[in-house]
Amino acid sequence: MCTGLTYNLADYFVRARDLICSDVPDHICPAADCTITLKFFPQFVNADTPGVLMKDEHTSQCSTAKNTHAMQAWKDGLESFKQNPKVASFTLERNEAKRQFSVFHRFTPAGTEYDCSIPRYATEFANVSKSYTDGLISIEDCWTGAAGAASCLSKALHEVGLDMEPMGKAGTDAMAGTGITHTSLSCTTNPTSIFKRLANDDVQVVNPKDHSWRKSDHHNAFEGLTFDEKVEDVSGPTLVLSHTTRASRRS
């Protein structure tokens, strides 16, 4: 099993940026300003961070072993971003309880159940990334309308020496519309409830008196999802911006 990266991930991202930007006309975006944004998720290095559905679930020995090996590769990638003058990076932080409910609501099979009363904490991968990246962005702050979106976008662009003026409101409008709208019921409205995923993609509260959940029914609820689905909301993504140069460096 791999215990680290055998290549420099930042160099790979910079080459991707150079290839993409080489085809962008100067009147659309001057070469000196051309910047791409990528996400670096723990699952890209084979980490397992789906969260917990019910109280009697336990992390398997397989997941623990996978994450032990994945952590070195995760750190290798983050270190490559930190050292490369053409890369800026941010830790994208999300409320962990809301993240796990989002994964449950969006991706698990019908019939899966989720206990809101379980304490949920950020993964080690999310915590480690803060020691390497150039900043921290709480994604919920970006979903508070135009003002929140503008603040997040401005913060990211500043790290590569750019500002929002050339794009006008286009960037803010695009970001302001990316918030995920859940059903009116969630762990926010029912913090001690158990929810069941329905076939119509909605959820409902399970009456505790009628609760008949069995671990054998749902302990593999995350199996069968495609790679793209699983990485959509995994914990601790790092936002990576590749540019011709980076405006500031961590001390």
Image (cartoon, grey):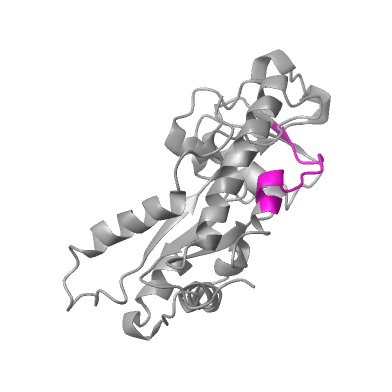
Residue reaching furthest to the bottom = 165
Figure quadrant of residue 2: top right
87 or 41, which is in the foreground?
Answer: 87
Left or right: 117 as drawn, with respect to 133: right
Left or right: 96 as drawn, with respect to 118: left
Give the magenta part as a residue range.
Answer: 114-128
Q: In which quarter of the image is the N terminus?
A: top right
Q: Where is residue 109 in the image (x, y as percent from the top left)?
A: 54, 27
Q: Residue at position x 76%, y 19% from top?
A: 212
62 or 95, which is in the foreground?
Answer: 62
Residue reaching furthest to the top = 216
Where 102 sits versus 57, above or below?
Answer: below
Q: Residue at position x 45%, y 48% from top?
A: 8
Q: Does the magenta stretch include residue 120?
A: yes
Q: Position of residue 207 (x, y in %)?
A: 77, 31
Q: Where is residue 121 in the image (x, y as percent from the top left)?
A: 76, 47
Residue 122 visible, this orientation? yes
Q: Position of residue 164 (x, y in %)?
A: 41, 81
Where 89 sits versus 117, above or below?
Answer: below
Figure quadrant of residue 169: bottom left
Residue 123 visible, this orientation? no
Q: In which quarter of the image is the C terminus?
A: bottom right
